[in-house]
Each structure stands twice: as C-alpha cells, then as structure tokens.
Image: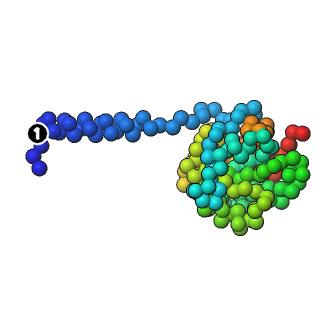
Amino acid sequence: MFHTTASIIRGVSAFAKQTTKRAVHTTFYAMAPVKVGDKLPAVDLFEDSPANKVNVCELTNGKKVVLFAVPGAFTPGCSKTHLPGYVQNADKLKSEGVSEIVCVSVNDPYVMAAWGAQHNTKGKVRMLADPSGNFIKALDLGTNLPPLGGFRSKRFSMVINDSTVEELNVEPDGTGLSCSLADKLKLKK
Ligand code: BEZ
C-alpha cells in the first residue's frame, strides 16, 4: 500500500486521539484508608453471579452490618480460621443486633459462592465478590499479593451502622489473623 506523508500524519494523529480517549477513562479512588465515621461508598458487589448486584449502601442503609474482608477465597488462613469464626459466631452476633454478616474478597462471584457452599454459610454469612476490587480500592484497604495474582484486600473487619463505619479492625501486617477475627469484635451497644 502507498502512503503519502500526509496520510501517515493523519494515521498517527488518529492513533494519538484514540490513546488520549483511553487515557481519560481513569477511575479515581480514595487516597487515604477509610476510618471510623466515614460513610461507605455506593459500590456494587456481586452475590452468586455477575447478574446479581448488591449495592453496599443499599445493603447497609438503616441496619447494623458486620463486614469482613479476606485476601482470598479458599486460602488456608481464610478457610481454616477467618470465615469459620464468623459462621460459628453468626447466631450470637445476630442476637446482639447485627442484621447481616458479609464476607468480601477480590474474587469472582462464582468462586465466592463455591467457597460459601463448602463452609455452609447460607443464612449466616453472605459471600460477596468484589471482582475488580472497586470496593476495596474505594476504601483504600488493598494490598499487592503476587502469590494470589496481585491486587487483593487486606484482612479486616468492620461494623457498619446505617452505611457509616462504626468500628474498624485492619490487620497490622495486612494478612494476619488477630484483630479482625469474629471473637475480637467489640460491637458498640
Ligand atoms: C491465607 O492463607 O490466608 C493467605 C495466603 C496467602 C496470602 C494471604 C493470605
């Protein structure tokens, strides 16, 4: 094919415009970690399938909700200790005024559903996926875990009252199993 200098310049210019268009589609995320007193972002999570959106603000409006986040479904610490602790304490937490207990991970909704089925979470803990990490990025509670594929959530627990953070327990090293365990929740009366 024969190209004139003008057609080459037009081509480069069109490419530059496309590149510029892609570059402006930037999502802005929180620059400081969420803290007690902050309102949660109105981000969608997914339950069981990508078709089933659960908006975090709608989920927590007018209710007390315990949310805990894990670095990864099916990982040893999350499967042997973190999730089972919330399943075992679910009835007690609900008798203390908690309407919902929610587990979040940067995984896809099918993985979260399969992990929940393995741990009999039905009716006790809702397994919500944050596949693109938008919720965790908005909270600025993410961490880079190359062995798990890259961006994941730090391990934390949170008590939410009417969409506002009332208690927050982030593991100091990001992945340990201490302050974020179910039996460590303080649950303000
Ligand atoms: C865990 O077992 O919980 C775990 C494994 C790898 C990275 C982070 C957490």
Give percent across and percent down for residue 166.
79, 37
* Quadrant of the snapshot with the C terminus: top right
Report whether residue 8 is seen. Answer: yes
Label 1 beta carbon less than 8 Å to ligand 1:
no
Question: Which residue is depicted at the point 60% across and 62% down?
Answer: 110
Question: Which residue is depicted at the point 40% across and 37% down?
Answer: 23
Question: Which residue is depicted at the point 73% across and 38% down?
Answer: 163
For label 1, the residue is 4
Horizontal placement of 188 versus 57: left or right? right
Horizontal placement of 160 versus 8: left or right? right
Residue closest to the eye, 126 or 106: 126
Tag 1: Cα neighbours inside 10 Å, few (<14), some, or many (≥20)?
Answer: few
- Residue 130, compared with residue 22, is above or below; it is below
How many callouts does the rendering have?
A: 1
Q: Residue furthest bottom?
A: 118
Mark 1: which secondary structure? Answer: loop
Question: Which residue is depicted at the point 75% across and 62% down?
Answer: 121
- Residue 32, compared with residue 179, is above or below; it is above
Give percent across and percent down for residue 60.
74, 43
Give percent across and percent down for residue 175.
69, 49
Residue closest to the eye, 168 or 114: 114
- Residue 188, compared with residue 119, is above or below; it is above
Residue closest to the eye, 177 or 135: 135
Give percent across and percent down for residue 143.
61, 45
Q: Amino acid at mark 1?
A: Thr
